[in-house]
Image (cartoon, grey):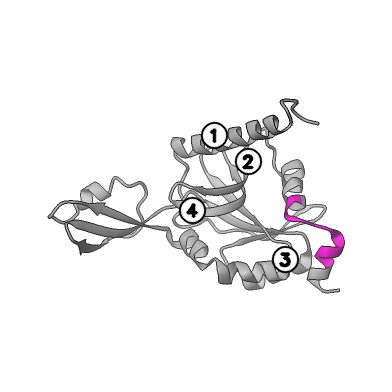
Amino acid sequence: MNEVAEIVDAKITERTIRDRMVRSVFSPYTDLLAFNLCGLGRYTHEMDLVRIMRSGWMYEFEIKISAADIRADVTKKPEKYDELQNGVEVRLKTFYDEDIDLSTIERVPNQVSDPYIVKRAGRATVANARIAHPVKEFTVVVPTDKLGEIAVSTLPSWVGVVVLDRFWKVVRAPSKLPNGRKLTDAERMDVLNRLSCRFWNMYLDRGGKGRK
């Protein structure tokens, strides 16, 4: 039985793994947990599950349930892995004749690269820069040892790999990302607002009856 058939036979889905993580591994009562979070700040990629600590550090977890899914992640999302390792590229403009004042750009939080690439575009000056992202560590979670082996051999060495079957087994510990940073208060409030909207949407969809 290959790894794909094994996953199908076990009827394991991404939601199955996510539910195990919330119920058995992390505590939603002590840490801020959010799933299917579509970007945060200038980091625009969807995150399967994030764990935000009281310290402000955020850990991202990607759930994979097949070998094809693991391999496709590297080929279809190269920009995500590049941003996690090297920071997020942004374009900054000023509509004046003079060049961009680099001291002004320095107010962009946690910029990574220097010097900036400055281009003239009419009366605007455009600077391409890289700033830090809000992820401290990135880990891929899979349901079987076989998929764990495939993940280790396929994904970059700085990506953590965990097998979650009955227990949480770390196959490879993640490396601290060189351009990660703590969340700002505004970013944490953004996550809380989104969680609040999801709760009220669920509540209203059930006719105001709460859990059923």
Q: Quadrant of residue 97?
A: bottom left
Q: Mark 1 touching mark 2, by CB under 8 A?
A: no
Q: Amino acid at mark 2?
A: Leu
Q: Amino acid at mark 1?
A: Asn
Front one among 211 and 133: 211
Q: Mark 3 touching mark 2, by CB under 8 A?
A: no
Q: In this rendering, which labeled residue sits more in front, label 1 or label 2? A: 1
The answer to whether residue 3 is above or below residue 185 is below
Task: Give the magenta-colored segment's residue range.
Answer: 6-15
Q: In the rendering, at what x and y percent does residue 166 appear?
A: 83, 53
Horizontally, is 144 left or right of 99 in the view? right
Q: Quadrant of residue 31?
A: top right
Q: In the rendering, at what x and y percent does residue 2 appear?
A: 82, 74
Judge the density around disc 1: few (<14), some (14-19), many (≥20) Cα neighbours within 10 Å: few
Q: Which residue is mark 4?
A: 44
Q: Amino acid at mark 4?
A: Thr
Front one among 63 and 182: 63
Q: Residue at x 51, y 40 (%)?
A: 56
Per the model, the C-alpha gap separating discs 4 and 1 is 17 Å
Kind of element beneath mark 1? helix
Q: Residue at x 55, y 59 (%)?
A: 175
Per the model, the C-alpha gap separating discs 2 and 4 is 18 Å
Q: Which mark is residue 193?
A: 1
Q: In this rendering, which labeled residue sits more in front, label 2 or label 4? A: 4
Magenta-colored stretch includes residue 145: no
Q: Which residue is mark 3?
A: 148
Q: Say which label, 1 or 2, has the lower sequence index.
A: 2
Q: Which residue is mark 2?
A: 33
Judge the density around disc 4: few (<14), some (14-19), many (≥20) Cα neighbours within 10 Å: some
